[in-house]
Amino acid sequence: MKNLYLLLLLVMSNSVFSQKINDTINSPSLNEKRAITISLPASYAKNTTKKYPLLVLLDGDYLLDPFQGALTYGAYWNDLPEVIIVGIRQKKERETDCAVDKETGLPDERSESFFEFIGTELLPYIEQKYRIATFKIIAGHDTTAGFLNFYLYKDKPLFNAYISLSPELPYAMEEQIPERLSLIDQPIYYYHSSADGDVKKMQDKIRKLDAGVKAIKKSSLNYRFDEFKEASHYALVLHSIPSALQQFFAEYQPITMAEFNEKIAKLPSGYSEYLAKKYEVIEKSFGIKIPIRINDFRAIEAAILKNKDYNDLDALSILARKSHPKSMMADYQLALMFEKKGDNKNAAKYYLNAYQKDEIGSLTKAMMIDKAETLKKTFSKNAKETAPEETVEEDPSKEQNAEEKKQE
């Protein structure tokens, strides 16, 4: 079953990601050319202004395909953003790239060069060549997973998010990482994992790291630790990747039933404001700006209708006009507001306005014209029922002539 799952991920990654580029960087730090693989999302060539989060993979030789598969699958369902992936090939060099002095627990001369290569050569090269958003992730497995933590030792860490898969932690790192995370001011996303198949010595240090980080009370720290039962040191990777990505990008995901029931539906007001803030957080956290999803509009609409806060549909229409200016969504929301408030004339007017715009989601031209025609009948009927009866006024001159004849 695990092999089938991996096969499906690999097939999807190869079919949906449009570009996989093999490249080399001439590195003065390493005094050599280093091979890398770059995976660009399917939309990269079409959407020429869009920026994408960056994922740097240590052990790119074998981690790129499973990460690519998970990201492709998540992006297909709009649960995860599209990401540019850069895999550093380390098959022969991983031990020397990430070597650590046993006494100090710090990189030795060679691995310090590799550390500088990533920060001063690889990242500037990728940022200059591709459209990179501000959100950057680094990931590694065992030896490289321990090494990537050194980027947290910098005053201003280069990466926003860290995925440390079954890390082999150098001397005292299980104590130093919690200390660093408690001092860093910028928002940090941190994920690490272990499994039954890990060496006990590794497990003990990983659990100690977990206990230290869990004691930190900071809203700016997005943290998760997974311990997988009945998983080997290598199978752990396939369990960890989707868990880490879902954790990091939870705020990016569309409104779920749980979010609707537990947060939105319980609000006394401000449903449209909730939606606007959700997308502001996505832009601020991940450096990517996306139009508000159609299903999220409909979720907020449902909350407004459920709580009969019909005036908030006006604010929702303003968001719709900004996000989808050519669509019928904005006029539809105004029409719905007037209809719920009993103003059928204005409701029909905006349904007809919507009819002239582009269809979007489940909103169609046929729906808009049907609603407008139905409402027209209601206010036409009301006009007839409330119209005053006609009265024939008598000519006063006739009444006067009649009275004169009586007198004669």
Image (cartoon, helix red, strand yellow):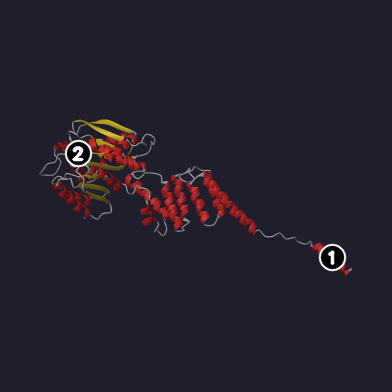
Looking at marks 1 and 2 on the same chain, the residue that comes earlier in the sequence is marked by 2
Disc 1 residue type (three-letter) = Ala
For the C terminus, give its image quadrant: bottom right
Q: Secondary structure at mark 2?
A: helix
Q: Is residue 269 left or right of residue 391?
A: left
Taking the view exactly as shown, the residue that stands out farthest to the bottom is 407
Please tell me the numbered disc located at residue 115: 2
Residue closer to the observer: 152 or 290:
290
The x and y percentages for residue 150 are 19, 43
Q: Residue at x 41, y 46 (%)?
A: 293
Label 1, label 2: how many angstroms apart (C-alpha)?
Answer: 117 Å
The x and y percentages for residue 17 are 33, 35
The x and y percentages for residue 152 are 21, 46
- Choose top left, top right, bottom left or bottom right for residue 401: bottom right
For the N terminus, give its image quadrant: top left
The correct choice, above or below, for 107 with respect to 395 in the image is above
Please tell me whether mark 1 or mark 2 is closer to you in this view: 1
Disc 2 residue type (three-letter) = Phe
Q: Residue at x 45, y 47 (%)?
A: 320
Taking the view exactly as shown, the residue that stands out farthest to the right is 408
The correct choice, above or below, for 181 with respect to 110 in the image is below
Give the residue at mark 1. 402
Residue closer to the observer: 343 or 367:
367
Q: Residue at x 41, y 49 (%)?
A: 296
Q: Secondary structure at mark 1?
A: helix
Please tell me the numbered disc located at residue 131: none
